[in-house]
Protein backbone atom coordinates (compact mmCIF):
# COMPACT_ATOMS: atom_id res chain seq x y z
CA UNK A 1 0.00 0.00 0.00
CA UNK A 2 2.77 2.46 0.81
CA UNK A 3 4.31 2.02 -2.65
CA UNK A 4 1.01 3.01 -4.29
CA UNK A 5 0.51 6.06 -2.07
CA UNK A 6 4.20 7.04 -2.47
CA UNK A 7 3.94 6.78 -6.25
CA UNK A 8 0.80 8.95 -6.24
CA UNK A 9 2.27 11.55 -3.86
CA UNK A 10 5.49 11.88 -5.85
CA UNK A 11 3.76 11.86 -9.25
CA UNK A 12 1.25 14.52 -8.14
CA UNK A 13 4.00 16.85 -6.88
CA UNK A 14 4.85 19.74 -9.21
CA UNK A 15 8.64 20.31 -9.16
CA UNK A 16 9.82 23.92 -9.07
CA UNK A 17 12.96 23.50 -11.16
CA UNK A 18 14.87 21.07 -13.40
CA UNK A 19 16.79 19.62 -10.46
CA UNK A 20 13.58 18.62 -8.71
CA UNK A 21 12.15 17.25 -11.96
CA UNK A 22 15.21 15.00 -12.16
CA UNK A 23 14.72 13.91 -8.54
CA UNK A 24 11.07 13.16 -9.24
CA UNK A 25 11.94 11.02 -12.27
CA UNK A 26 14.57 9.09 -10.32
CA UNK A 27 12.16 8.54 -7.40
CA UNK A 28 9.44 7.22 -9.67
CA UNK A 29 12.00 4.90 -11.27
CA UNK A 30 13.10 3.72 -7.80
CA UNK A 31 9.48 2.91 -6.95
CA UNK A 32 9.60 0.27 -9.67
CA UNK A 33 11.80 -1.76 -7.32
CA UNK A 34 9.87 -3.66 -4.66
CA UNK A 35 12.47 -2.96 -1.94
CA UNK A 36 12.54 0.82 -2.54
CA UNK A 37 11.32 1.59 1.00
CA UNK A 38 13.66 -0.84 2.78
CA UNK A 39 16.51 0.76 4.70
CA UNK A 40 18.62 -2.21 3.53
CA UNK A 41 18.16 -1.41 -0.18
CA UNK A 42 21.46 0.30 -1.04
CA UNK A 43 21.70 0.34 -4.83
CA UNK A 44 21.05 3.09 -5.54
CA UNK A 45 19.30 3.71 -2.21
CA UNK A 46 15.85 3.95 -0.64
CA UNK A 47 12.98 6.31 0.08
CA UNK A 48 12.99 8.38 3.24
CA UNK A 49 10.46 10.90 4.56
CA UNK A 50 11.15 14.11 6.40
CA UNK A 51 9.30 17.15 7.68
CA UNK A 52 9.96 20.84 7.75
CA UNK A 53 7.99 21.87 10.82
CA UNK A 54 7.01 25.52 10.91
CA UNK A 55 6.39 27.44 14.11
CA UNK A 56 2.81 28.51 14.88
CA UNK A 57 3.57 31.95 13.36
CA UNK A 58 5.22 30.25 10.33
CA UNK A 59 8.38 32.36 10.72
CA UNK A 60 10.69 29.64 12.08
CA UNK A 61 11.50 26.05 11.20
CA UNK A 62 12.47 23.34 13.68
CA UNK A 63 15.90 21.84 12.94
CA UNK A 64 17.80 19.07 14.69
CA UNK A 65 21.52 18.47 15.04
CA UNK A 66 21.69 14.94 13.69
CA UNK A 67 23.84 12.71 15.88
CA UNK A 68 25.39 10.56 13.13
CA UNK A 69 25.73 13.18 10.39
CA UNK A 70 26.57 16.14 12.65
CA UNK A 71 24.47 18.44 10.48
CA UNK A 72 21.52 20.71 11.23
CA UNK A 73 18.64 19.10 9.34
CA UNK A 74 14.89 18.68 9.41
CA UNK A 75 13.44 15.71 11.34
CA UNK A 76 13.05 12.63 9.20
CA UNK A 77 14.25 9.17 8.46
CA UNK A 78 13.54 5.70 7.19
CA UNK A 79 10.17 4.25 6.26
CA UNK A 80 8.82 1.65 8.70
CA UNK A 81 6.53 -1.27 7.82
CA UNK A 82 3.78 0.26 9.96
CA UNK A 83 3.77 3.54 7.95
CA UNK A 84 0.69 3.75 5.73
CA UNK A 85 2.03 6.68 3.71
CA UNK A 86 5.09 8.87 3.34
CA UNK A 87 3.26 11.68 5.15
CA UNK A 88 2.55 9.30 8.04
CA UNK A 89 6.25 8.35 8.11
CA UNK A 90 7.22 12.03 8.26
CA UNK A 91 4.75 12.69 11.11
CA UNK A 92 6.07 9.62 12.99
CA UNK A 93 9.67 10.83 12.63
CA UNK A 94 8.69 14.25 14.01
CA UNK A 95 7.04 12.58 17.02
CA UNK A 96 10.07 10.33 17.63
CA UNK A 97 12.78 12.95 17.16
CA UNK A 98 11.26 16.10 18.65
CA UNK A 99 8.21 14.86 20.53
CA UNK A 100 5.70 16.89 18.52
CA UNK A 101 2.43 15.15 17.83
CA UNK A 102 1.10 16.28 14.47
CA UNK A 103 -2.50 15.45 13.76
CA UNK A 104 -3.13 12.84 11.04
CA UNK A 105 -5.38 15.52 9.52
CA UNK A 106 -2.38 17.86 9.22
CA UNK A 107 -1.66 18.70 5.60
CA UNK A 108 0.26 15.87 4.01
CA UNK A 109 1.19 17.21 0.58
CA UNK A 110 4.74 16.84 -0.68
CA UNK A 111 6.60 20.16 -0.37
CA UNK A 112 10.06 19.23 -1.71
CA UNK A 113 12.08 16.36 -3.19
CA UNK A 114 15.76 15.74 -2.58
CA UNK A 115 18.27 13.00 -3.24
CA UNK A 116 21.46 13.07 -1.21
CA UNK A 117 24.39 10.78 -0.58
CA UNK A 118 24.77 9.04 2.77
CA UNK A 119 28.41 8.16 3.48
CA UNK A 120 29.46 4.58 4.14
CA UNK A 121 29.49 3.45 7.75
CA UNK A 122 30.82 0.28 9.31
CA UNK A 123 27.69 -1.75 8.54
CA UNK A 124 26.33 0.06 5.45
CA UNK A 125 27.81 1.02 2.08
CA UNK A 126 27.45 4.55 0.77
CA UNK A 127 23.98 4.99 -0.70
CA UNK A 128 21.40 7.62 -1.55
CA UNK A 129 18.39 8.78 0.41
CA UNK A 130 15.49 9.61 -1.87
CA UNK A 131 13.91 12.09 0.54
CA UNK A 132 10.28 13.09 0.17
CA UNK A 133 9.72 16.20 2.25
CA UNK A 134 6.55 17.50 3.82
CA UNK A 135 5.71 20.78 5.52
CA UNK A 136 3.68 20.92 8.71
CA UNK A 137 2.76 23.65 11.17
CA UNK A 138 3.50 22.96 14.83
CA UNK A 139 0.69 23.50 17.34
CA UNK A 140 3.18 25.14 19.76
CA UNK A 141 6.88 25.91 20.21
CA UNK A 142 7.26 23.06 22.72
CA UNK A 143 9.38 20.05 21.75
CA UNK A 144 11.53 17.36 23.38
CA UNK A 145 14.43 15.55 21.70
CA UNK A 146 15.34 11.86 21.82
CA UNK A 147 18.78 10.24 22.02
CA UNK A 148 19.25 10.31 18.21
CA UNK A 149 19.15 14.09 18.33
CA UNK A 150 22.05 16.01 19.84
CA UNK A 151 20.16 19.30 19.91
CA UNK A 152 17.11 20.94 18.35
CA UNK A 153 16.08 24.53 17.94
CA UNK A 154 13.73 26.85 16.15
CA UNK A 155 15.59 28.67 13.37
CA UNK A 156 14.18 31.93 11.97
CA UNK A 157 13.59 31.48 8.24
CA UNK A 158 15.34 34.76 7.48
CA UNK A 159 18.47 33.76 9.43
CA UNK A 160 18.66 30.01 8.85
CA UNK A 161 21.99 30.39 7.07
CA UNK A 162 23.52 31.28 10.46
CA UNK A 163 22.73 27.76 11.68
CA UNK A 164 23.30 25.51 8.68
CA UNK A 165 25.22 25.47 5.44
CA UNK A 166 23.37 22.42 4.08
CA UNK A 167 22.09 23.59 0.69
CA UNK A 168 19.10 21.25 0.67
CA UNK A 169 17.86 22.80 3.93
CA UNK A 170 18.65 26.35 2.80
CA UNK A 171 16.79 25.74 -0.48
CA UNK A 172 13.66 24.62 1.38
CA UNK A 173 13.95 27.56 3.77
CA UNK A 174 13.90 29.87 0.73
CA UNK A 175 10.80 28.07 -0.57
CA UNK A 176 9.12 28.41 2.83
CA UNK A 177 9.99 32.12 3.11
CA UNK A 178 8.69 32.72 -0.42
CA UNK A 179 5.44 30.87 0.35
CA UNK A 180 5.02 32.84 3.58
CA UNK A 181 5.62 36.19 1.83
CA UNK A 182 3.05 35.32 -0.83
CA UNK A 183 0.40 34.35 1.74
CA UNK A 184 0.42 37.78 3.36
Image (cartoon, rainbow, N blue to C red):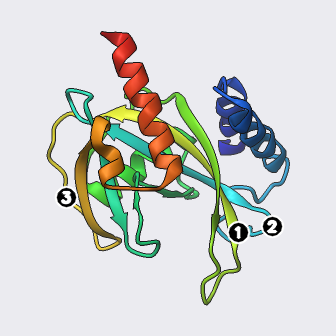
Q: Is residue 4 visible?
A: no
Give coordinates of residue 134: x percent, y percent.
48, 37
Relative image position of residue 12 (x, y in whole percent): 68, 24
Q: Which quadrant: the C terminus?
A: top left
Task: Confirm or deny contact between disc 2 and disc 1 (CB under 8 A).
Answer: yes
Of badges 1 and 3, nearer the viewer stands 1
Q: Is residue 19 above or below residue 150?
A: above
Viewed as shown, does residue 83 lie left or right of 63? right
The residue labelled by disc 1 is 127
Q: Which residue is mark 3?
A: 144
Query: Residue 26 location, x and y as percent?
Result: 79, 45
As rendered, which of 64 and 163 lies closer to the eye? 163
- The residues tagged by marks 1 and 3 sit, at their Cα atoms, a distance apart of 30 Å
Seen from the viewer's position, the closer of residues 64 and 138 is 64
Q: Quadrant of residue 13?
A: top right
- The answer to which quarter of the image holds residue 10 is top right
Amino acid sequence: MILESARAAIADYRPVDPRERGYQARMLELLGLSASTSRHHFVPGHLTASAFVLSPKRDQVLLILHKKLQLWLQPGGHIEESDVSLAAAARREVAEEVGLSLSPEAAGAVFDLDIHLIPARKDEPAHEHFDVRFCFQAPSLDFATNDEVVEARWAPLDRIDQLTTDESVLRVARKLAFARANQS
